[in-house]
Amino acid sequence: MRTPWIIGIGFLLLLLSGQAVAQTVIPRVTENRVSFHSIDIFLQEDGSARVVEQFFFSFFADEAAQLEKDFEENTPSLFEWKRDYPFIHPYAGIESQAESLDFFLRQTVSGQPTLELSYNYPVGLAQKVATENQGRTARWKLSDSALLNFISAGSISIDAKTQVKIYLPTGAVVDKRLLQQGLLDNSNVITLSNFQSNALNVQYAILTPIADPIDTSKFISDVVGSPLFFFLVVALVLAGIYAYLNRESLSEKIEDYIVEHSEFKTAKGPEVDNDLE
């Protein structure tokens, strides 16, 4: 008649083991509590780009502390981050083409941690489509793959808690005829948030100067860094010493040179007629 006791003990052990498992559940923040997601795309003149993303969270319980712990354990591996936080990955362009991924843990004004992810695209986010004006103007286009992660059923959809900013290269001239109104500001920055469209056509032109301006500071630094700079300084010092020691002789030579090469003309006086008495 020990069966009820055995069953009771087994049930108690099962209950305790269940509580132990429950206690080991790691409190990690989930995607649905990302309060704001910013994506800044900095396009360069050669079509490359630098991307900086920030994830802001609404934490529950110990999730903030766990994020800080995971930051130490997972960085710099994107694979480790995606294992614990599947929604943490590059959202601009094609993930497999992103290079130089860096993770940073920042703090908001309230002291809560926020995660920053930055990476490079050597090529791909902007494509050259034409060269005009005898090679002086290059026309570029934002690649269709730049916002690939926001395309669903053939439509670009960016919700209100996500903000994508596209910083165009310095001096770029945007073709506003192709761009929806209200997206471009006076600083040549295109902002997309709470945005939905079947297409986004961003084209811009970059003027190439006829001749590259001379960088004086770079020229000086190149000269100073040259191995010949030391010998040039020594030669100038020796020349100065020689000129000082022979200053009297050099002064006389200079005066003689000036006298020999100067034209002194005497004014003609009135002619005298010798026949006059």
Image (cartoon, rainbow, N blue to C red):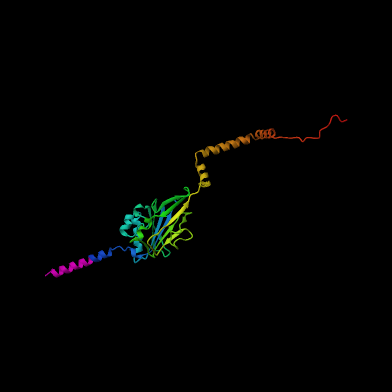
Q: Nearer the viewer, residue 262 or 143?
A: 143
Q: Which residues are magenta?
A: 1-16
Q: Quadrant of the C terminus?
A: top right
Residue 66 magenta-drawn?
A: no
The percent position of residue 264, horizontal first and vertical second, equals 73, 35
Along the line of sight, the residue nearer the viewer: 167 or 29? 167
Instruction: State whether residue 115 is above or below residue 233.
Output: below
Q: Residue furthest right?
A: 277
On the question of residue 21 being in view, the answer is yes
**Does 86 appear above or below 6?**
above
Give residue 88's quadrant in the image: bottom left
Residue at 27%, 65% (x, y): give it. 23
Magenta stretch, main secondary structure, is helix
Image location of residue 106, percent across then percent down: 40, 60
Q: State the image coordinates of residue 143 (x, y, percent, origin top left).
A: 39, 55
Q: Which residue is situated farthest in the left direction here?
A: 1
In the rendered view, would you say 221 is above or below 154? Answer: above
